[in-house]
Each structure stands twice: as structure tokens, then as C-alpha cells.
Amino acid sequence: MTTRIGFIGGGAMAEALLKGILAQGLAEPGAVYVSDINSDRVTYLAQTLGVKPARDNQAVLAVGDIIFLAVKPQVAVEVLSALRGSFSERHLVVSIMAGVPVSYLEKYLGAARLIRVMPNTPCLVQAGAAGIAAGSRATAEDLEQVKNLLNAVGKAFVVPESLLDAVTGLSGSAPAYVYMFIEALADGGVLAGLPRPVAQTLAAQTVLGAARMVLETGEHPGSLKDKVASPAGTTICGIATLEEGGFRGLVIDAVMAGAERSAELGAARK
């Protein structure tokens, strides 16, 4: 029997997940249903990806087995209140809403099983990083199934829900920090005389290459850093400048600030 997937919400993150799931052959377009308050958005997804438009959220629940809750956290109460009583034990619900804890969501889901996911925006280019946490009724099979779906757009790790705030502070927020770093590297290149387009491409490609080195070699980043920094060379001079400015400490503080803010938002909804 074909598993039918429903998306309540069809924004950018939903589109990214849909593209990855379909590209990896984890679902057929005709078995995926999407609803969104913006009918033009549903039409766009139907025309570009071949998925089925649903007239409303109730229609998604009527046909879907795996249901992605992909709406903004600000409208969680409104959306879930309207669906209370419509979920059943047939449904595996996957929430990608940031800061909305399992305990809060399960009040509305009846007998449905729940997996909470914290993805990040690079899943738009199939290079995402996500944390996955199980609800009280979710099974090991449910976790594995959702992990496979998320791995279609990057890498996914199962963690206790208590660590999703840490995931938010790290992979959820850090793409913005990396963009700032790329921009700063490019500015440095321009200051040194490079044309802006060349500097930006060199900066982005350098970050991409360095990340791949970490992932593909499995070496500690410090070890890879030491291999670049030769005695009295250009790199060690640059490293010394970063250390003088507190570079690593600031990055650590930024991750902690994001994690703490995520915890605050979640506590407000319990």
C-alpha cells in the first residue's frame, strides 16, 4: 500500500522537503497532498511538483497517513484547534514548527503519533541539518521513517526533545552566521583588491570546501586547521587576529543565545 503524505502549509520549508522527498523517490507526486491558506501557493506546488492540491486542512487529514505540520508557530493554536478531533491513530504527524513542544502539540492530536523536527533552510538545496525527537506515542519505526524522509534533504539526527533547543541554536540559526562569515570574507577579499563577484564566489566555495573536508574526512576541525597553518605563514597570522577578537568565544555565545531563546519560546507554550 502506498504511503500518502500530507502537508498542512506549503511555504518554502515545505517546498524544500517536498522536492527532496520526490527526488529521492520516497513518495509519488500523486500520493502527496498539500493545503495552504494561500491558494496560489498550492496551485504553484501542484503545477511545478505534480502534487495534489487539497481544498483545506481537513482534506489533507482525510487522505494522508504522514502529516507534516508546516505552518508558522504563530498560527499553531488556530490551525490545531480547527483540527482537534480529526486526527486518528492512523496518522503520523511531523511538526516542523519551531518552539512548539511535544507536550503542547499532543493536546490536539488525539491518538496520532508525533515526531517533532527542527530543520534548517539549507534543506532548500538538499543540504539541510535536522534534529528529530519522538512524541510519547511514536515508535522506533516512526522515527526511522521520518529520519529517512529528512535525510532526503540533508542529514538528520534523532535526539531527545530536550536537545532540540540546542539543535535550534546550532543548525537552526547558524546558517545566518555562516552567511555573515561569507560576507565578511568577501569584504576582506574586496579590500585586498579582488572584484566583488570573484571575492564572493571564492568565499562561498572556500566555506563549502572546508565543510566537505570535515564531513568526508571525519577529522577534527582543529586538526584540519593545523594542516593549513604553516609556521610563520599567512594563515597562522590570520588565526592570531581572529583569536585576538574573541572569534570562537563569540560563536559559542551566539549558539547558546539561540538555544536559550528557543527554550524560552517553548516554555511559553507548555
Image: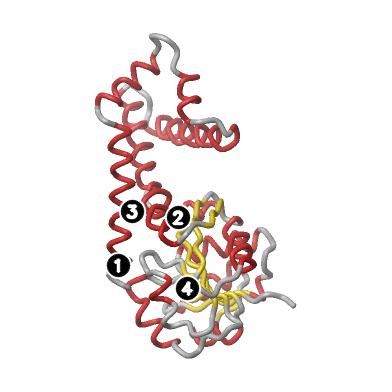
Which labelled disc corresponds to residue 20?
A: none
Instruction: Tell me the mark number nearer the camera, choosing from 1 and 2.
Output: 1
The amino acid on which the numbered mark 3 sits, given as a three-letter code, is: Ala
Q: Residue furthest bottom?
A: 85
Q: Earlier in the sequence, mark 4 or mark 2?
A: 4
Q: Amino acid at mark 4?
A: Leu
| Displayed quadrant of residue 264 | bottom left
Report x, y in % for residue 185: 36, 31
Give residue 232's quadrant in the image: top left
Mark 1 vs mark 4, foreground winner is 1
Point out residue 243 in the picture as x, y percentages from the top left corner: 29, 25
Q: Are marks 4 and 2 in contact (CB under 8 Å)?
A: no
**Mark closer to the chain start, 1 or 4:** 4
Q: Would you name the residue on which mark 1 appears?
A: 267
Location of mark 2 (residue)? 120
Could you classify mark 3 by the number of other residues whose Cα lies within 10 Å: few (under 14), some (14-19), or many (20 or more)?
A: many
Residue type at numbered disc 1 = Ala
The residue depicted at 38 percent of the width and 47 percent of the height is 174
| Mark 1 / mark 2, whichever is N-terminal | 2
